Image (cartoon, rainbow, N blue to C red):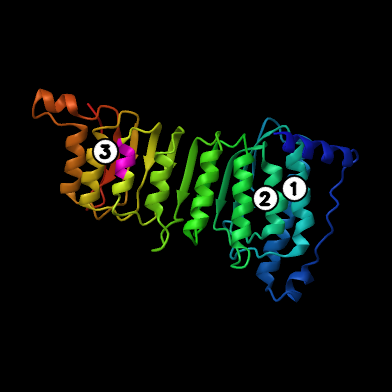
Amino acid sequence: RCGSLERSIQVLKKDVDWTYSAPDILRSHWIEQGHDEEYADNMERFLYEIKFEAEYIRNESGDHYCSECLNNKNAPTIILHDDALLPHFKEFANAIQVTTSDIEIAIENIELNPSALGILFPSMEGKASDFWMGSILFSAENVAECYEIIAASIRNHHTLRWLAWVDNRISSDKQAELLIESIIDNRSINTLTLNNCFNQSDINGCRALATLLTCGRPFVALSFSRNSLSGIEDVAAALATNPQLETLRIGDNQLSDSDAGLIAEALKQNTNLQELCLLGNNSITSAGFEKIRSTIYDPSSLNAVESCNHTCYVDHMDVEGNDYGMTPR
């Protein structure tokens, strides 16, 4: 918190008569770099939005602001790193530092290297409440340093409530451990989305999820969709320890009837979970879902009813693609 305050004070000292001073980047710059006209069009839009938001955040952003200037989601191509962008990132970062608004920030479909991360991430500490990172490109030679910068920033980010890390392929177990440990060390994050990050054969998504479930710190919701989870013995065992978690979303994975049986047994021991989303796990057949259903509601005897899970709603889809919910009674 002291670091964030000190950065804000330094920015204010320098910016008594602030104007946006990052140098213009001519359209010809992008063409000379080998990009086409469409890329140049997108960069003109991108730079305009950074300037607009930097000015708006400083002057009239109000109590809450959702920043989209670094969200390149719908663009035709990814924005690649260029040192010419750094002064513009600095203007945006300085605006974040001095605002009193509650900020939501989305960064997507952009290449970030250590120099860009070193400008952007410290500015968000103590400022942003919700943070989305999607389809971020890290070059192979910089990926380890990038993860170190991101992990250090997450640890220091005491206002962060929701973190989304989506479509960012984690390339090693070491990087996965660094990210998960930083999230656990951060005591303010209560909602975490890690979708389509672990679906490579040598990266263990089940271990990452089990670590989060057993870390001893509460979460409102965890989303681990599209991570090729299967053989979830460790996850089910962690779920059976009754962690302080209200919602778990593990849809669109590769769960089987065997996994469904493990989930059913875990739910018998869990009284905290209120919602479990299994949508898209088409390898679970009706027999597998029946195991879960009987855990949620089994009227065969009074003892069976008493031993059911009376707290968790389970959302799932059958083999025909019909969406069903299992409601505890």
Picture coordinates of residue 128 (x, y %)? 64, 39
Dot 1 surroundings within 10 Å: few (below 14), some, or many (20 or more)? many
> Viewer-proximal residue, 45 or 216?
216
Kindly indicate the quadrant of the structure image that contains residue 60: top right
Disc 3 element: helix
| Residue found 51% across the figure and 40% down from its top | 184
Residue identified by numbered label 3: 266
Residue identified by numbered label 2: 69
| Residue found 66% across the figure and 60% down from its top | 113
Dot 2 surroundings within 10 Å: few (below 14), some, or many (20 or more)? many
**Does label 1 or label 3 sit earlier along the sequence?**
1
Vertical position of residue 50 compared to residue 304: above or below:
below
Residue identified by numbered label 1: 92
Image side of residue 301 versus residue 25, left or right: left
| Residue found 65% across the figure and 59% down from its top | 112
Picture coordinates of residue 245 (x, y %)? 40, 33
Dot 3 surroundings within 10 Å: few (below 14), some, or many (20 or more)? many
> Viewer-proximal residue, 31 or 160?
160
Vertical position of residue 78 compared to residue 287: above or below:
below
Image side of residue 88 versus residue 210, left or right: right
Kindly indicate whether the residue at mark 1 contacts the one at mark 2 (C-beta within 8 angstroms).
yes
Amino acid type of disc 1?
Answer: Phe
Frontmost of labels 3 and 2 is 3
